[in-house]
Image: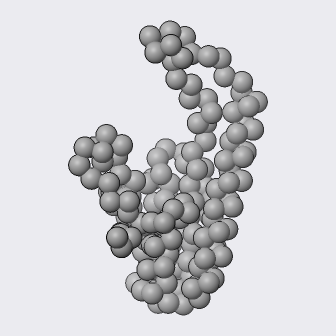
Protein backbone atom coordinates (compact mmCIF):
# COMPACT_ATOMS: atom_id res chain seq x y z
CA UNK A 1 0.00 0.00 0.00
CA UNK A 2 1.30 3.41 -0.95
CA UNK A 3 1.20 5.95 1.85
CA UNK A 4 -0.38 8.56 -0.42
CA UNK A 5 -2.82 6.36 -2.34
CA UNK A 6 -6.45 7.09 -1.53
CA UNK A 7 -8.82 4.93 0.42
CA UNK A 8 -12.51 4.51 -0.37
CA UNK A 9 -15.30 4.67 2.17
CA UNK A 10 -18.66 3.29 1.05
CA UNK A 11 -20.99 5.90 2.51
CA UNK A 12 -24.78 5.89 2.66
CA UNK A 13 -25.23 8.19 5.66
CA UNK A 14 -26.12 5.35 8.02
CA UNK A 15 -24.63 5.02 11.52
CA UNK A 16 -22.57 2.09 10.19
CA UNK A 17 -21.15 4.21 7.36
CA UNK A 18 -20.32 7.01 9.81
CA UNK A 19 -18.54 4.48 12.05
CA UNK A 20 -16.59 3.19 9.03
CA UNK A 21 -15.50 6.74 8.17
CA UNK A 22 -14.42 7.44 11.75
CA UNK A 23 -12.39 4.21 11.87
CA UNK A 24 -10.81 4.99 8.50
CA UNK A 25 -9.70 8.37 9.86
CA UNK A 26 -7.99 6.68 12.81
CA UNK A 27 -6.33 3.95 10.75
CA UNK A 28 -5.35 6.05 7.73
CA UNK A 29 -4.72 9.59 9.02
CA UNK A 30 -3.90 12.14 6.34
CA UNK A 31 -4.78 9.84 3.44
CA UNK A 32 -7.02 11.14 0.68
CA UNK A 33 -10.48 9.59 0.79
CA UNK A 34 -13.03 8.80 -1.88
CA UNK A 35 -16.53 8.94 -0.41
CA UNK A 36 -18.62 6.61 -2.59
CA UNK A 37 -22.41 6.74 -2.53
CA UNK A 38 -24.33 4.45 -4.87
CA UNK A 39 -27.95 4.90 -5.90
CA UNK A 40 -30.21 2.57 -7.83
CA UNK A 41 -32.00 3.95 -10.89
CA UNK A 42 -35.39 2.82 -12.10
CA UNK A 43 -36.89 1.96 -8.73
CA UNK A 44 -39.97 3.99 -9.60
CA UNK A 45 -40.64 1.66 -12.52
CA UNK A 46 -40.80 -1.41 -10.31
CA UNK A 47 -44.52 -1.67 -9.70
CA UNK A 48 -45.88 -4.61 -7.74
CA UNK A 49 -48.94 -6.54 -8.85
CA UNK A 50 -51.62 -4.39 -7.16
CA UNK A 51 -54.02 -7.27 -6.51
CA UNK A 52 -51.36 -9.87 -5.79
CA UNK A 53 -52.91 -12.38 -8.20
CA UNK A 54 -50.53 -12.17 -11.13
CA UNK A 55 -52.53 -9.63 -13.04
CA UNK A 56 -51.13 -6.84 -15.21
CA UNK A 57 -49.10 -4.19 -13.46
CA UNK A 58 -50.14 -0.57 -13.44
CA UNK A 59 -48.67 1.32 -16.43
CA UNK A 60 -45.54 3.31 -15.61
CA UNK A 61 -45.05 6.93 -16.66
CA UNK A 62 -41.53 7.10 -18.11
CA UNK A 63 -41.32 10.83 -17.40
CA UNK A 64 -42.10 10.26 -13.72
CA UNK A 65 -39.47 7.52 -13.53
CA UNK A 66 -36.86 9.91 -15.00
CA UNK A 67 -37.91 12.64 -12.57
CA UNK A 68 -37.58 10.29 -9.60
CA UNK A 69 -34.18 9.10 -10.86
CA UNK A 70 -33.03 12.72 -11.00
CA UNK A 71 -34.20 13.23 -7.41
CA UNK A 72 -32.39 10.05 -6.34
CA UNK A 73 -29.20 11.19 -8.09
CA UNK A 74 -29.32 14.55 -6.28
CA UNK A 75 -29.98 12.77 -2.97
CA UNK A 76 -26.95 10.51 -3.51
CA UNK A 77 -24.79 13.56 -4.30
CA UNK A 78 -26.04 15.18 -1.09
CA UNK A 79 -25.20 12.09 0.96
CA UNK A 80 -21.71 11.93 -0.58
CA UNK A 81 -21.23 15.64 0.23
CA UNK A 82 -22.28 14.93 3.82
CA UNK A 83 -19.60 12.23 3.93
CA UNK A 84 -17.00 14.70 2.66
CA UNK A 85 -17.99 17.17 5.40
CA UNK A 86 -17.73 14.45 8.06
CA UNK A 87 -14.33 13.45 6.66
CA UNK A 88 -13.13 17.05 6.95
CA UNK A 89 -14.27 17.12 10.60
CA UNK A 90 -11.88 14.24 11.35
CA UNK A 91 -9.00 15.72 9.35
CA UNK A 92 -9.35 13.92 6.03
CA UNK A 93 -9.47 15.45 2.57
CA UNK A 94 -12.21 13.71 0.62
CA UNK A 95 -13.70 13.60 -2.84
CA UNK A 96 -17.38 12.75 -3.29
CA UNK A 97 -18.44 10.17 -5.86
CA UNK A 98 -22.17 9.60 -6.28
CA UNK A 99 -22.68 6.84 -8.81
CA UNK A 100 -25.62 5.13 -10.44
CA UNK A 101 -25.72 1.41 -9.73
CA UNK A 102 -25.46 -0.29 -13.11
CA UNK A 103 -25.55 -3.90 -11.92
CA UNK A 104 -25.29 -4.22 -8.20
CA UNK A 105 -23.88 -2.06 -5.44
CA UNK A 106 -20.83 -4.28 -4.83
CA UNK A 107 -19.77 -4.22 -8.47
CA UNK A 108 -20.25 -0.45 -8.59
CA UNK A 109 -18.18 0.08 -5.43
CA UNK A 110 -15.48 -2.19 -6.86
CA UNK A 111 -15.45 -0.24 -10.13
CA UNK A 112 -15.15 3.08 -8.27
CA UNK A 113 -12.26 1.63 -6.24
CA UNK A 114 -10.51 0.55 -9.44
CA UNK A 115 -11.16 3.89 -11.18
CA UNK A 116 -9.59 5.79 -8.28
CA UNK A 117 -6.83 3.22 -7.68
CA UNK A 118 -7.54 3.06 -3.96
CA UNK A 119 -5.50 0.97 -1.57
CA UNK A 120 -8.39 -0.22 0.56
CA UNK A 121 -12.18 -0.13 0.63
CA UNK A 122 -13.76 0.59 4.02
CA UNK A 123 -17.37 -0.45 4.62
CA UNK A 124 -19.66 -0.48 7.61
CA UNK A 125 -21.54 -3.61 8.53
CA UNK A 126 -25.08 -3.74 9.84
CA UNK A 127 -24.37 -7.15 11.33
CA UNK A 128 -27.24 -8.85 9.52
CA UNK A 129 -26.86 -12.60 9.78
CA UNK A 130 -28.78 -15.84 9.70
CA UNK A 131 -32.05 -16.09 7.80
CA UNK A 132 -32.38 -12.33 7.35
CA UNK A 133 -28.98 -12.20 5.61
CA UNK A 134 -29.92 -15.15 3.40
CA UNK A 135 -33.20 -13.56 2.38
CA UNK A 136 -32.02 -9.97 1.98
CA UNK A 137 -28.39 -10.55 1.11
CA UNK A 138 -25.52 -8.59 2.52
CA UNK A 139 -24.02 -5.68 0.62
CA UNK A 140 -20.87 -5.94 2.73
CA UNK A 141 -20.48 -9.64 1.96
CA UNK A 142 -21.06 -8.96 -1.71
CA UNK A 143 -18.36 -6.26 -1.69
CA UNK A 144 -15.97 -8.77 -0.11
CA UNK A 145 -16.64 -11.17 -3.00
CA UNK A 146 -16.54 -8.63 -5.85
CA UNK A 147 -13.79 -6.22 -4.85
CA UNK A 148 -10.26 -6.91 -6.08
CA UNK A 149 -8.79 -4.66 -3.41
CA UNK A 150 -8.46 -5.18 0.33
CA UNK A 151 -11.72 -4.57 2.19
CA UNK A 152 -11.95 -3.42 5.81
CA UNK A 153 -15.29 -4.17 7.43
CA UNK A 154 -16.14 -1.98 10.41
CA UNK A 155 -18.82 -2.95 12.88
CA UNK A 156 -20.39 -0.17 14.85
CA UNK A 157 -19.90 -0.79 18.58
CA UNK A 158 -23.02 -1.77 20.48
Say if 60 sits above or below 91 in the image: above
Please state the horizontal and vertical placement of residue 142, each as a whole percent of the image. 36, 53
| Position of residue 124 in the picture relative to residue 38 (left or right) | left
| Position of residue 35 in the picture relative to residue 143 (left or right) | right
x 68%, y 59%: residue = 77
What residue occupies the far left of the structure in this picture? Answer: 130
Q: Quadrant of residue 81?
A: bottom right
x 31%, y 40%: residue = 135
Q: Quadrant of the C terminus?
A: bottom left
Q: Nearer the viewer, residue 128 or 57?
A: 128
Please state the horizontal and vertical placement of residue 149, each as a whole percent of the image. 38, 69
x 23%, y 49%: residue = 130
Please state the horizontal and vertical placement of residue 13, each as a whole percent of the image. 56, 63
| Position of residue 157 in the picture relative to residue 129 (left or right) | right
Q: Is residue 67 visible?
A: yes
x 63%, y 74%: residue = 84
Say if 136 sits above or below 28 in the image: above
Q: Is residue 4 visible?
A: no
Please state the horizontal and vertical placement of residue 148, each as a whole percent of the image. 37, 64
Q: Quadrant of residue 125?
A: bottom left
Q: Quadrant of the N terminus?
A: bottom left
Amino acid sequence: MAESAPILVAYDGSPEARAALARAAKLFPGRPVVIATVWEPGLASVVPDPAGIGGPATPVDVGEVAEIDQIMSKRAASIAAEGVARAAEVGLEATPVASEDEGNVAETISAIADDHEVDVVVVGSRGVSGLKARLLGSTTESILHHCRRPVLVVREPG
